[in-house]
């Protein structure tokens, strides 16, 4: 598994893997409740979600993978979205790339386009090796890069009564 799936700059994740009769390796996505093809991007997603829920205390019940949105009359999918406790407001969008894909301005442009629809406060981009997190201040019309993804309790503190 190590040669096929590179080590990431994330804690190890307890993944359930299987290889189907078709020879395709799959991983169980507990958020979607099914096995999905284990692509390099999915490898990053599963580790990052495990990091959010295991290390940073994010409730799995508030996280969705492959969340559908409509952008300019076109169906799109956000890789991962964290919702408010009411389940109504997106708080964070996470966009993943495979480890061999460099995080460029184009990747940030993609998540910003998704955020035009969702209006989340936090945006995260990761290729499993490098992670970027920024906070959007809509009132001041500014974006501030954070040194790391905040733990869930700190995020709730930032929200105050918003969540």
Image (tube, grey):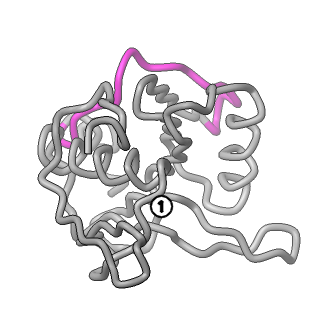
Identify the residue at horizontal 41%, vertical 33% (top origin).
Answer: 128
Magenta-colored stretch includes residue 119 = no
Q: Quadrant of the N terminus?
A: top left
Q: Splitting the image into 4 quarters, where does residue 142 fall? A: top right
Q: Nearer the viewer, residue 33 or 150?
A: 33
Q: Is residue 161 above or below residue 123?
A: below
Q: Is residue 106 above or below residue 47?
A: above
Residue 154 is situated, as x and y percent measured from the top left of the image, at 22, 34
Q: Is residue 123 above or below residue 149?
A: below
Q: Nearer the viewer, residue 140 or 71?
A: 71
Identify the residue at horizontal 66%, vertical 28% (top origin).
Answer: 140
Q: Which residue is mark 1?
A: 90
Is residue 109 found left or right of 6 in the rendered image?
A: right
Q: Splitting the image into 4 quarters, where does residue 69 fall? A: bottom right
The single residue placed furthest to the top in the displayed view is 147
Q: Nearer the viewer, residue 32 or 113?
A: 32
Identify the residue at horizontal 52%, vertical 71% (top origin).
Answer: 67
Q: Nearer the viewer, residue 162 or 155?
A: 155
Magenta-colored stretch includes residue 148 = yes
The single residue placed furthest to the right in the displayed view is 72
Neighbour tally class for label 1: few under 14, some 14-19, many 20 plus, Cα within 10 Å = many
Residue 157 is situated, as x and y percent measured from the top left of the image, at 24, 38
Is residue 54 found left or right of 7 in the rendered image?
A: left
Residue 49 is situated, as x and y percent measured from the top left of the image, at 29, 51
Q: Which residues are magenta?
A: 138-153
């Amino acid at each position: 598994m190590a040669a096929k799936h590179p080590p990431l700059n994330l804690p190890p994740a307890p993944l359930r893997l299987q290889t189907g009769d078709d020879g395709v390796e799959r991983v169980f996505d507990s958020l979607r409740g099914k096995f999905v093809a284990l692509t390099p991007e999915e490898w990053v997603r599963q580790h990052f979600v495990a990091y959010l829920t295991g290390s940073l205390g994010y409730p799995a019940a508030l996280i969705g993978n492959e969340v559908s949105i409509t952008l300019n009359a076109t169906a799109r999918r956000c890789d991962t979205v964290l919702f408010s406790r009411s389940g109504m407001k997106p708080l964070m969008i996470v966009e993943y790339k495979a480890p061999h894909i460099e995080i460029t301005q184009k990747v940030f442009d993609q998540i910003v386009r998704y955020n035009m629809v969702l209006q989340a406060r936090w945006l995260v981009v990761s290729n499993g090796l490098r992670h970027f997190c920024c906070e959007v201040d809509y009132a001041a019309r500014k974006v501030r890069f954070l040194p790391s993804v905040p733990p869930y309790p700190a995020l709730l503190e930032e929200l105050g009564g918003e969540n």
